[in-house]
């Protein structure tokens, strides 16, 4: 497996494990007020990073743009989840970090879209 895919799966799996622990803590405490942060950790972290890693593994794509995708997407979710949690707790100072990290995550997805679409050049006929 290429290192890029392994990097995506490593970050994604860590998000999946911490997202599940987050969910268990919410369920056990009965306090579900941070559930949007839990959902974003699982969906923008675990699900999206793992899907991207799977694409890079099966397609053989990668290179500099693939690593840019990895750093944007991983940094985006790493900053988004805590800032969203603070924002939900009423800490308004977290809002600019939340906004910036959302843009990072969206730029990561934009990079991924560019990589995916660029594969049409070399795609085999079905
Ligand atoms: C051990 C595993 C997990 C536990 C214990 C758990 C627990 C919870 C709890 C307690 C809630 C709040 C429910 C409510 O207030 O109605 C929740 C919401 C949610 N969870 Fe999880 N969860 C787990 C894994 C996952 C995974 C793997 C995903 C997605 C890949 C996920 C996605 C969501 C979503 C989308 C919501 C709704 C968020 C919202 O409405 O704001 N969860 N979860």
Image (cartoon, rainbow, N blue to C red):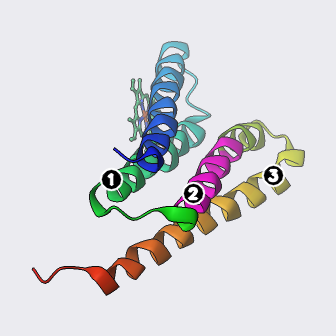
Measuring 76% from the left and 36% from the top, which residue is drawn there?
Answer: 89
Q: Which residue, as the protein is rendered here, is positioned at the far left?
A: 126
Give the mark nearest the N terminus, 1 or 3: 1
Measuring 53% from the left and 17% from the top, which residue is drawn there?
Answer: 25
Q: Which residue is mark 1?
A: 57
Disc 3 from disc 2: Cα separation: 22 Å
Circle 1 SS class:
helix
Measuring 83% from the left and 46% from the top, which residue is drawn there?
Answer: 94
* Ligand 1 lies under 8 Å from the Cβ of mark 1: no
Give the mark nearest the N terminus, 3 or 2: 2
Q: Nearer the viewer, residue 33 or 110?
A: 110
Give the mark nearest the N terminus, 1 or 2: 1
Residue 106 percent coordinates (x, y): 60, 66
Q: Which residue, as the protein is rendered here, is positioned at the far right?
A: 93
How crowded pointer 2 is (Cα within 10 Å; few <14, some 14-19, many 20+) is rated as some
Magenta part mainly helix, strand or loop?
Answer: helix
How crowded pointer 1 is (Cα within 10 Å; few <14, some 14-19, many 20+) is rated as some
- Left or right of residue 16: residue 95: right
Can you tell which quarter of the image residue 22 is in?
top right
Q: Nearer the viewer, residue 22 or 17?
A: 17
Q: Which residue is mark 2?
A: 67
Disc 1 from disc 2: Cα separation: 13 Å
- Left or right of residue 119: residue 29: right
Q: Is residue 19 above or below residue 53?
A: above
How crowded pointer 3 is (Cα within 10 Å; few <14, some 14-19, many 20+) is rated as some
Q: Which mark is residue 97?
A: 3
Residue range of the region highlighted in magenta in the rendering: 66-80
Residue 36 percent coordinates (x, y): 56, 43
The quadrant of the rendering that contains the C terminus is: bottom left
């Amino acid at each position: 497996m290429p290192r890029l895919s392994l990097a995506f799966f490593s970050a994604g799996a860590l998000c999946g494990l911490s997202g599940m622990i987050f969910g268990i803590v919410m369920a056990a405490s009965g306090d579900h007020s941070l559930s949007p942060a839990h959902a974003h950790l699982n969906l923008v972290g675990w699900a999206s990073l793992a899907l991207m890693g799977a694409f890079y593994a099966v397609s053989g794509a990668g290179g500099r743009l693939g690593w840019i995708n990895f750093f944007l997407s991983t940094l985006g979710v790493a900053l988004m989840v805590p800032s969203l949690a603070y924002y939900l707790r009423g800490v308004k100072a977290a809002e600019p970090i939340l906004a910036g990290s959302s843009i990072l995550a969206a730029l990561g997805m934009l990079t991924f879209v560019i990589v995916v679409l660029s594969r049409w050049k070399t795609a085999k006929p079905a």
